[in-house]
Amino acid sequence: MAGPEYDTEIKQLQSTMKTIGQVLDLDAMRAEIDDLGVQVAAPDLWDDQDNATRVTGRLSLLQGQVERFEELLSRIDDLGVLVELAQEEGDADTLAEADRELGALKKSVEALEVRTLLNGEYDAREAIVTIRSGAGGVDAADFAEMLMRMYTRWAERNKFPVEVFDVSYAEEAGIKSAEFAIHAPYAYGTLSVEVGTHRLVRISPFDNQGRRQTSFAAVEVVPQLEQTDEIEIDENEIRTDVFRSGGPGGQSVNTTDSAVRLTHLPTGIVVSCQNEKSQLQNKAAAMIVLKAKLLAKKKAEEAALKKDLKGDVAASWGDQMRNYVLNPYQIVKDLRTGYETGNPQPVFDGEIDDFLEAGIRWRRGSEKADAN
């Protein structure tokens, strides 16, 4: 790449960062950080644990955003210096290093730009993901497990902790359903674009005649609650069932009835948890998920938009949002954004950032269109 081309690329990155800074309103963020810092330093902060949790969580989030922005600005400046030195000395190796850094910076700036689009009420929250197998029998159960692996691998790639609440294994292979949390800022805003029916087409590994099979799985995403969220549940409206935890193939992984299933009678919402060792721990974890789902339902009803937070997913023909085709050709295509790739395996290995970014941009475009 020639010198003027580097200059153009760097100026474009700087211009994009300036726009991002305006959208983020860095001055307001820094002022809020100063105010929160004063509150955190107060000796009576933890007298009100709910408020302390809110204050410290908000402070950590804002500090992380500002530090990320400033780090990218610094890297862009350093790139300019690196290019200038390399060109003065005719150092091909250093120019190659500059090319790699330019590519990495483009991706990082683009990701930060997408983050500015996540400004919904709950977008900054952690996420609780539910996956259910749909039409397609054992292939659907296997597909549901593939999707669970896809999202957990995505989280691992980004060093996001995953907490599995419950997995209901199918008899032959795969899972009937799974519920897990991804603990990371903006996990909900990012993954909420995955809500919908996912469709897999492949030669079934479970069909001894080698026929092609179409199967479906549903993905639901709700925001993790914070202690300051007001969701009250009448204990009389919950049915609690306890059962023995089980693993693949029905193997017992616990000799006591420690797994817990909660049914919210007025809404019919059912959640289970069998990941913890004691019944009390499982009930507490299940209650977290139940409250999150009730909050999603409440907010969707308030907005009169059923799909705002949780989506009404049937997991069958006609309502899929993404196709994964492994035979007779290979492609993964999002039917809303049009984004596609001809290499499905990396997608199943958790490389879904491009799909997520396209989904976030598509959603923002849809929101603007609806507002006009």
Image (spheres, rainbow, N blue to C red):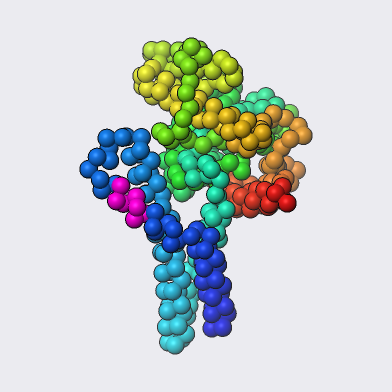
The foreground one among 127 and 146 is 127
Q: Is residue 37 magenta?
A: yes
* Residue lying at the far bottom of the rendered structure: 88
* Residue lying at the far left of the rendered structure: 43
The correct choice, above or below, for 183 with respect to 218 in the image is below
- Identify the residue at image location x=50%, y=15%: 238
Question: In the rendered image, which quarter contains the N terminus?
Answer: bottom right
* Residue lying at the far right of the rendered structure: 318
Part of the protein shown in magenta? 33-39
Q: Is residue 180 left or right of residue 266?
A: left
Residue 337 visible somewhere in the drawing:
no
The correct choice, above or below, for 158 with respect to 113 in the image is above
Q: Position of residue 370 (x, y in %)?
A: 72, 47
- Identify the residue at image location x=41%, y=12%: 257
Q: Is residue 223 left or right of residue 37?
A: right
- Identify the residue at image location x=45%, y=12%: 242
Q: Position of residue 70 (x, y in %)?
A: 41, 64
